[in-house]
Amino acid sequence: MNKRRQRNSNNVLFRICWRIMAILLVIGIPAVLFVSTFHIKKIEVVGAKRYTTEQITEQLMQTKQDSNAIYLYLKYNYFTKVRIPFVEKVDIEMVDNHTVTIFVYEKMVAGCVDFMGEYLYFDKDGIIVESSSKRLEDIPIINGLQFDKIVLNEKLKVQKDELFDIIINLTQLIEKYDLGVDTISFNNKYEVTVDCGDIKVLLGKRSTYDEVLSELKNILVKAKGMEITLDMRNYVKGTDNIIGKLKIPTE
């Protein structure tokens, strides 16, 4: 009787083990095939200007599962918001089983203010889009803005909303003419001064700055290496109404 019970127990144990093995095989083989079939071997990054392909890849693929093309596609297209400074969102496209393209959409930045050791970056509407201790060299610091508080993802309240229109006009032209401006400053009359390294340029108050900045591009080439203040407040296209004053070294 005992032997029969033992044989029955062994048979039950054998059947349980066999079923477990069968389940593991049913689940395990497809899982292995899924991982190997969609393992990412090539990544192309499109649209990133502030980050390299390696930096974007490192930020997005931080776990072993992220190396699976389908997993990565579903994760960032439907479930997870990207957390990369100055990046609004990313879209993942599967090119084939082993190749993905990452489309990066960066935040539009018009300028920044230096506040308590942090650089607060805002867009064309004056909305603070990022706070960072890192200075982006291609984004000018804006001086002369008056504000009481700064809240991330909210509009920077300054003395005149129209100043943001002037700032975006200036920054677009600065990028267009590749002027390398470090700071844009407003005085109490809303006259504009820009600093390009050791060269300070008084631009005054205008409805548009296209003509004066177009001419400034040519002047900066000639004034390279100088410490000089350029007064272009009365500049009119086709005239020589520009005053240059060299900085005299003091001992």
Image: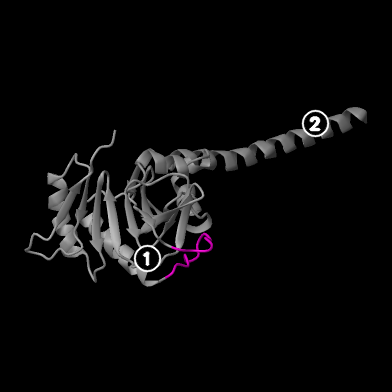
Q: Quadrant of the C terminus?
A: top left
Observer-nearest of 52 and 90: 52
Observer-nearest of 49 and 202: 202
For the residue carrying disc 2, how many other residues have a C-alpha within 10 Å: few (<14), some (14-19), or many (20+)? few
In which quarter of the view is residue 97 placed? top left
- The three-letter amino acid code for the residue at tag 1 is Asn
Among numbered discs 1 and 2, the one appearing first in the sequence: 2
On the rendered structure, is 134 left or right of 207? Answer: right
User: Residue at point 23% right, 41% down?
Assistant: 248
The secondary structure type at the circle numbered 1 is loop
> Which residue matches tag 1?
188
Start and end of the magenta stretch? Answer: 146-159
Is residue 52 highlighted in magenta? Answer: no
Observer-nearest of 163 and 68: 163
Q: Residue furthest left?
A: 238
User: Residue at point 40% right, 71% down?
Assistant: 161
Q: Identify whether 155 is placed above or below 28.
A: below
Numbered label attached to residue 10: 2
Q: Quadrant of the N terminus?
A: top right
